[in-house]
Image: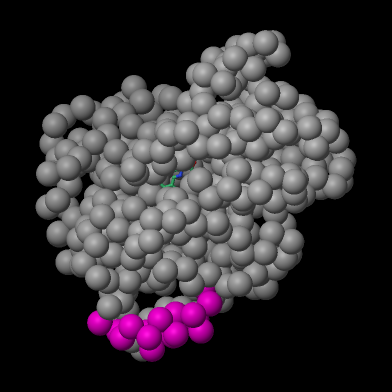
Amino acid sequence: MNGPVEPFKIKMVERVGMPDEQRRNNAIIEAGYNTFLLKSEDVFIDLLTDSGTSAMSDYQWAGLMTGDEAYAGSRNFYHLREAIRDVLGYTSYVPCHQGRGAEHLMYSYLVKPGQIVPRNMYFTTSKLHVELPGGRMVDIIIDEAHDPENEYLFKGNVDLKKLQALIDEFGLGKIVFVNVEMNVNMAGGQPISMQNLRELRKFCNDYKLKIIFDATRSSENAFFIRDREKGYENVPIIEILREMMSYSDGCIYSCKKDALVNIGGFLATNDKEIFENTRNMVVVYEGLHTYGGMAGRDMEAVARGLREGAQYEYLKYRVNQVRYLGELLNKADVPIVKPIGGHAVFLNALKFLPHISRNQWPAQTLTAAIYEESAVRSMERGAVSKGRDKETGQNIYPALELVRLTIPRRVYTNTHMEYTANSIINLFKKKDTISGLKMVYEPKYLRFFQSRFEKISL
Ligand code: P70
C-alpha cells in the first residue's frame, strides 16, 4: 500500500527535531499530562489539530502582499465576498477573527434563555456559545454515530425522529433553529448526506424552523458526498457545496480548516435580519464589518484558500492521506473509529486501554503515552472535552472516548504518517504497562485546554 501522491511540490521547509526520551518524559510531566500545554518545540509531529496548521500555497502567500489594510472598505473584503458567493452561494457575510467569533455573534443573536438548540453532535466551542446566552444544545445525530465500530457511510446524519421528539416534548416555541455540522468533528470527521440535508430542509420548512450550519469542514464533506452518494459521482465540488448551503439559512465558518489559512472566520447568510443584526454586533466584539478582526492580507489568503480547498484533486489527496494513516493502524488491529474520517484518525481509547476506568481518563492517558513514546502530539476527545453536566455538576462520560490524530493540510509527508502509525502500533503492543491519570486542576470553561493531571501508579 502506498500513500496518495501529493498534487503539489515543496518550495519551503521547516526544521523539526526529535526530542530524546528524557526530554519527552520531563516535558509531559511539566505539561500536566495535557498535550495542549506542551511546547511546540518539544513536539516532533504535531497532530493536535488541523486548525490553523495548513501550509498555504505560493498563490496564497503572494496574496498577502496585496493586502489592503485600510480601516474601512478593504479591497480584500470584496474579494472574499466574491469567493464566498462563488464557492458557498451566500450573498452576505460578516468577517470574524476565527470560527468562535462567528459562533458568538450568530448564537448570541439567535439563542434566548431557556431555548433548545438541536445539533448533530455537540462541538465544544459551539456548545459553550449556545449555553452562554442561556440555551441548551441537544444531540440529534443518528445512533450509528455513537458507535465507533459502525461503518455507516453518513454517520453525520440528523435523526429526524429525534428532532420530532424534541418538538413534541418541549414545543416548537423552545426551538428556534437547528444547528447542523458538516463532517462532524466529535463523531470522527463523519459526513452528512445530501439526501439527509434535503429531508431536513423539508421538515424544517413545515415547522418554519431555521437551519444554521457549522460549515467549517464543508469541502471535505462535499468530497464524501461525491465519493459516496449516488448521483454526485461527476458533479463539481463547488456545485455540491452550493447545493448543500442552499438548504440552510446561514452558517458559521472557521477558515482555519478547509480554507487553508492560519487564521480567520466568518458567518454567511442570505437572511437579511440575521445579516443586519450580526453585522451590527461585529463592531462591538471583533472590528469594523469590513475586516472583523482579520487583517486585509488575511482576508485575501482566505479568499484564495476557500477556492483552492474546494478543488477535487486536492481534496482527494487530502482525504486519502488521512485514510492511509487509518488503514496502517487498522491493519495492525489498533482500534480506530470507522469509517476513517475526513480530517483525522480517531483511536478508540476504551478499546486501546480497557484496563483504565473512565474516571481515570483513558483518552487523556493515551494522548500522553503516545507523546512519551514518539513525540507525536494528539488530542483528547472524550470525557475531559465533554465537561460536566450544567445542572448536576457531575462529569459526563460520552459513548465516544477518543484520541484524535489530526492531519494538518499539505504539511506532513506519507513517511510522517508511517512513523506515526509504527509508533502507535509499538505502543499498542505494550498497552498493559500504561497507567491512568487523575485530574488535579480544572478551569471553569473549556477545561480540556488547561486542565492538569498526575499519573496514578499501576
Ligand atoms: C479543532 C478546532 C474548531 C471548530 C470546529 C467546529 C466544527 C467551530 C470551531 C471553532 C480548534 C479547537 C477548538 C476547540 C477545542 C479544540 C480545538 N476546531 N466548529 O481542532 O473554530 O477554532 O476557528 O474558533 O472544529 O477541531 P475556531
Query: At x 49% / y 80%, what residue is drawn?
Result: 162
Q: Quadrant of the N terminus?
A: top right
Query: At x 85% / y 47%, what residue is drawn?
Result: 333
Color encoding of the figure: one colour
Where does the image place residue 281, in percent across and percent down from the top left? 14, 51
Residue situated in front as seen by the camera: 109 or 229: 109
Q: Quadrant of the C terminus?
A: top right
Q: Is residue 422 left or right of residue 209?
A: right
Res 288 visible:
yes
Q: Which residues are magenta?
A: 158-173
Query: At x 17% / y 47%, what residue is drawn?
Result: 282
Question: Is residue 449 on the magenta stretch?
Answer: no
Where does the image place residue 192, in percent across and percent down from the top left? 56, 66
Name the chief secondary structure element in magenta.
helix
Relative vertical location of residue 224 with respect to residue 125 in this rendering, above or below: below
Where does the image place residue 336, in percent across and percent down from the top left? 73, 50
Q: Is residue 35 left or right of residue 112?
A: right
Res 205 visible:
no
Residue situated in front as seen by the camera: 101 or 348: 348
Q: Which quadrant of the figure has residue 276?
A: bottom left
Question: Is residue 169 on the magenta stretch?
Answer: yes
Q: Is residue 366 left or right of residue 438?
A: right
Where does the image place residue 331, in percent across and percent down from the top left? 86, 46
Query: At x 41% / y 59%, what residue is drawn?
Result: 389
Q: Which quadrant of the figure has residue 80?
A: top left
Residue situated in front as seen by the camera: 87 or 458: 458
Q: Quadrant of ligand 1?
A: top left
Q: Please give the count of numbered marks on the rendered protein.
A: 0
